[in-house]
Image (spheres, rainbow, N blue to C red):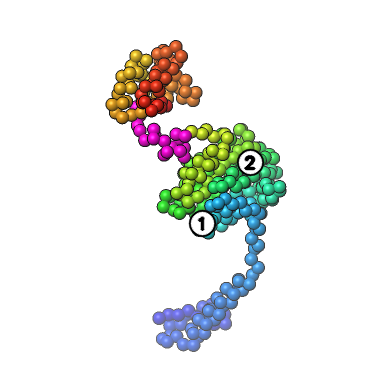
Amino acid sequence: MTCVVHDNSTAPVYCSRRPCGRRCFFSFLTRCFLTLSVGFALQLLPAGEAAEVLTVVETSCLRLAVGSDARVVEFVDRQRGENCVAGEGGPCAWVRKANQQFPATSAALVDGQWHVRFGDLDMEAVLRVTAQARHLTWEVVSFSNEDIDEFVFCDVPLKLQGVPTEPFAAIALALNLKTRVAELPRAASRLRATCYPKFGCAGAAVAIVATPPADMRAALQEAVSAAPELPHSPLGGPWALDAPINRGSYLFDFAGITEAEVDEWIALARSLGMTQISFHSGSSIRFGDFQSTDEFSEQAASPGTAVELTMCRSISPAGAMWS
């Protein structure tokens, strides 16, 4: 067996003696001593100081903490005491300008609001995060310089995978038309909300709903009910599972229904156990404003009204639904 040892020079000495002898043994001890010494010395080196926690916001289920470096450092499931932030967290916001991303680098707490800055950029965002029973409201109060492409005013990376088997779930829910949340309102692994200067950044808002999965639908109902700019429907969104009419099925109309044929369509729907007829957008009604198309309008003086009202009155004794 060939061993590598070192003499007083830096060049290695290859020993093929069997056994290798003292020099191999002492070389081994020397390497061990040097390794331990370096490791001990590294432990004594002064570590970089972690940014202080700027603010903590809590709901009954969640604790959110952001540092003075504007990084999200805690997203804690209070029931289990587990921090769900991915890795060491990340900047709570960032801007995109001229196809470059600039993360938030510092934050100060002034009168309960976060004053966030982005490195050397001459701009400051003021954010307000407030706690309700089971969700946070995260909103843009002001933005000093809107010479940007977009402003991601909320960004929380999570180690959660957004799957039903996890004991904790989090959702970002846009609260108005100024706010874009790309993901569907379902459990997610990253919570982001974006606004754009074209529509104005001030006033953009997102709800961060974080609860055990069994409580999520009720918490979403609370968040939607508390948002004046969101449509409230007892048949849709987080209430959809409670509405018996949603357990039925429906027929599509592709501009084929006339007022003279309403009774036939009602009889067909009843015979199939269906409670809804959908007037297909693009055929019966226009995309966007949902006004009746020219072909469909010819069936009634007020476009489609006679057909629609007759359907709603007659298709089901309990009250039908058309869409």
Choose top left, top right, bottom left or bottom right for residue 141: top right
Q: Position of residue 186 (x, y in %)?
A: 46, 44
Q: Is residue 45 above or below residue 251?
A: below
Q: Residue at x 64, y 56 (%)?
A: 53
Counting from the top left corner in percent of width and height, residue 321 is at 41, 27
Taking the image as drawn, is residue 23 in sight? Answer: yes
Residue 89 appears at what percent x and percent y?
A: 56, 54
Element at label 1: loop
Residue range highlighted in magenta: 234-252
Task: Report whether residue 69 is seen.
Answer: no
Image quadrant in which the C terminus is located = top left
Q: Which residue is mark 2?
A: 140
Q: Is residue 188 left or right of residue 48?
A: left
Determine whether, in the image, residue 279 is placed left or right of residue 194.
left
Q: Which mark is residue 284?
A: none
User: Three-letter amino acid code at disc 1?
Assistant: Gln
Q: Report the residue marked by disc 1.
A: 79
Rendered view: 296 above or below 36: above
